[in-house]
Amino acid sequence: MNLETIEILVHRFYFLVESGIILYVFVINSIYLLLTVMAFVSMRRNHAPFSPGEREALMRSPLMPAISLIVPAYNEAMSVQESVGCMLKLDYPNYEVVVVNDGSKDETLQVLIESFHLYKSARAPVGALSTKPVRRVYESSDPIRLVVVDKENGGKADAINAGINMATSPLVMVVDSDSIIDRAGLLQMVKPYLEDPERVIAVGGTVRAVNDCEVHDGRVTRIRTSASNVANFQAVEYLRAFYGGRVGFSLLNSLLIISGAFGLFKREAVLEVGGFEHATVGEDMELIVRMHHHYLDRKQPYRVVYVAEPVCWTEVPQTLKILQRQRKRWQRGTVESLWRHREMLLNPRYGVVGMFAFPYFLLFEMFGPAVELLGYALTALGLVFRIISPGIALLFFSVSIVFGILLSTSAVLLEEMTTLRYPSWRDSVRLFGTAILENLGFRQLLTWWRVQGLMEGLKGKRGGWGIMERRGFKAAPQQ
């Protein structure tokens, strides 16, 4: 075999690999675009917030199911007072807030005790999920529905389970301690359960970035983009993830993840599957996959629903260092969740979940970053060594970057045409600009971090609470 023949074979092999990657990226983006179109149709049809009259009737109804808000907290002294205060002002007739201090090393517990006039309570857990020992239980001496559980450190899943044990309501909502829920958020979240109480076991809502939005009296009073480009990139990313993929998967009853920052669950369903898993960093996704696994195994009818209208506002990282840790952790959680339930993959027994959602998450969410990164590397090398033509390189960047811009701008457009959260045209223009720019560097950086998380997940690296630098909420100016 002479040198010329070897060169021809290398070129052909390179062309086949590059073509395969281009096809792969095209398929994943096409599926995501289809899910976004499904989301658009669904949200335009079903976007109907409660009218003032409906809200008042629900607030007066004695039939509204009780909800326990479970708020796991670890080293949240800076934001816990305001976020818990916000949760105590929600429009819902029958709920309690259960904050679980997971052995914080800062003043989280002391801030709660002093801010809400807590006293030691004899309240005992009613659930039997295994957790680290509980040291004390506190309740507020004020006429508010607040319980604080102080326990030894065991991680986020352990803290949530301790809260579920303490909860007495048929529904539990898990909310991050640095978050603010829309005033009518509980009413919107409980709507699918009211419509189908027998089958609905979990409901997810939308999570949005609160950075630089103005907060007053438990409400986000002014919604705007952040001064931080890193935060704005994430704002667009959240829109794409929630308003695109999750609506589509929900319509197919194959949603594999409900955000750990904002999820409503039927308590008995969570207890039936054993609560949140301690041994994974992706406890939110793992629980939902396990619920699908459990109910499909038993052929029990059930639904896991996503509703776009209720919004939970959370502080997102503003430094690349913290964001890197978060995304690597999320990717490890995806690896762990899919590996634990690998028997569902392409198994007709698990219906749409096993035949579509599971393969999608495995091929595109788990391994997708590695394939995309390989595509960038091969394309660059192919151009340098003249193995591929500029036309092939242009095709790859078109289906990856241009398609990515289309998906991001579509998500922003979907937000503008339905919920219209940004009242200022300047913020809307900036958001559209961010949707374009995030595909030109930021997305590639996230891809690299996700590949690192993939490798750590495959190696079995473990982790605990994610580290997050809190800046606190931006107060609205005094009138």
Image (cartoon, rainbow, N blue to C red):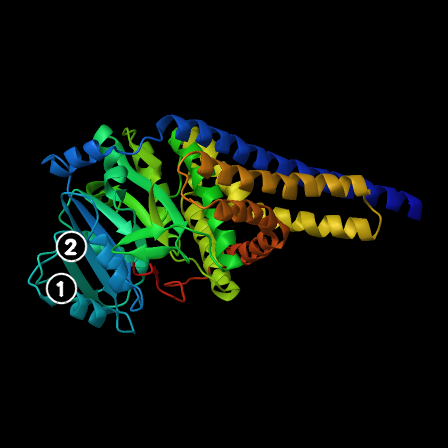
Coordinates of residue 374 in the picture (x, y in percent): 66, 50
Coordinates of residue 139 in the picture (x, y in percent): 11, 61
Give the residue type that dot 1 points to.
Val
Q: Residues within 10 Å of mark 1 (few under 14, many from 20)?
A: many
Q: Earlier in the sequence, mark 1 or mark 2?
A: 1
Compared to residue 261, the image places residue 244 above or below, namely above
Q: Quadrant of residue 391?
A: top right
Say the numbered circle drawn on residue 166: 2
The residue located at (81%, 44%) in the rendering is 388
Residue 204 as seen in the image, left or right of residue 382? left
Say the numbered circle drawn on residue 137: 1
Give the residue type that dot 2 points to.
Met
Compared to residue 263, the image places residue 124 above or below, namely below
Q: Nearer the viewer, residue 366 or 8?
A: 366
Residue 394 as seen in the image, left or right of residue 153? right
Q: Quadrant of residue 248?
A: top left
The residue located at (47%, 32%) in the rendering is 356
Compared to residue 154, the image places residue 105 above or below, namely below
SS at mark 2 in the image? helix
Alpha carbon separation for disc pair 1 and 2: 9 Å
Q: Are marks 1 and 2 in contact (CB under 8 Å)?
A: yes
Q: Quadrant of the N terminus?
A: top right
Coordinates of residue 392 in the picture (x, y in percent): 77, 40
SS at mark 1 in the image? strand
Q: Is residue 220 visible?
A: yes
Q: Nearer the viewer, residue 83 or 213?
A: 213
Q: Is residue 367 visible?
A: no
Q: Residues within 10 Å of mark 2 (few under 14, many from 20)?
A: many
The residue located at (24%, 43%) in the rendering is 186
Q: Quadrant of the C terminus?
A: bottom left
Q: Nearer the viewer, residue 186 or 223?
A: 223
